[in-house]
């Protein structure tokens, strides 16, 4: 079973509609092709550069750490995983990819547009 790491966007209606539709659709599939792991979504107020108003902005927290942790746990379970596929554009995952490769795992990294 695959693993999907993400967080739900709460405060920005324009940004949350399509990802939330996708996540809702994934959860209706039986059997589930992916287990969804959610990061924490924290809201912070940021100052608008043009009008100086405080605007709530979502910040995704710990999704990248959870992704790397699961990847390494899978890599350390010698008999369960030979190949890993990571779909990300987050270069913070490079150390985890290299560690999995040191353990003899083949890691394919797919960079989304």
Image (cartoon, helix red, strand yellow):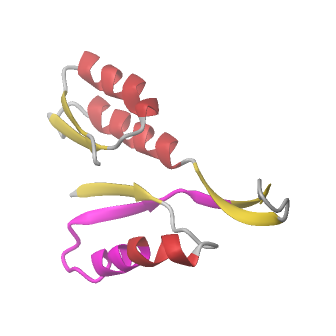
- Residue nearest the observer in this picture, 26 or 113: 113
Could you tell me which residue is drawn at 37 percent across and 80 percent down? Answer: 21
Provide residue 47's location: percent of width, then percent of height.
Answer: 81, 56
Provide residue 87's location: percent of width, then percent of height.
Answer: 28, 45
Note whether 95 is above or below 1 in the view shown.
above
Q: Is residue 2 left or right of residue 93?
A: left
Kindly indicate the quadrant of the structure image that contains residue 98. Answer: top left
Provide residue 1's location: percent of width, then percent of height.
Answer: 21, 58
Q: Is residue 77 left or right of residue 92?
A: left
- Residue nearest the observer in this picture, 70 or 55: 55
Residue farthest along the bottom direction in this orientation: 28
Note whether 25 is above or below 112 in the view shown.
below
- Residue nearest the observer in this picture, 84 or 47: 47
Could you tell me which residue is drawn at 50 percent across and 70 percent down? Answer: 15
Q: Is residue 47 left or right of residue 73?
A: right
Provide residue 11's location: percent of width, then percent of height.
Answer: 64, 73
As for residue 35 lying within the magenta part, the answer is yes
- Residue nearest the observer in this picture, 94 or 83: 94
As for residue 13 lying within the magenta part, the answer is no
Could you tell me which residue is drawn at 40 percent across and 70 percent down? Answer: 19
How many tags in the picture? 0
Magenta segment:
20-42
């Amino acid at each position: 079973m695959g693993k999907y790491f993400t967080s739900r966007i709460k405060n920005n209606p324009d940004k949350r509609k399509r990802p939330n539709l996708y996540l809702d659709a994934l959860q209706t599939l039986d059997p589930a092709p992916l287990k969804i792991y959610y990061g924490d979504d924290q809201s912070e107020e940021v100052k608008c550069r043009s009008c100086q108003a405080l605007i709530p902005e979502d910040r995704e927290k710990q999704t990248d750490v959870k992704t790397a942790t699961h990847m390494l746990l899978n890599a350390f379970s010698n008999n369960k995983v030979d190949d890993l596929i990571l779909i990300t554009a987050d270069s913070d995952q490079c150390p985890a990819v290299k560690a999995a490769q040191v353990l003899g795992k083949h890691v394919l990294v797919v960079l989304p547009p």
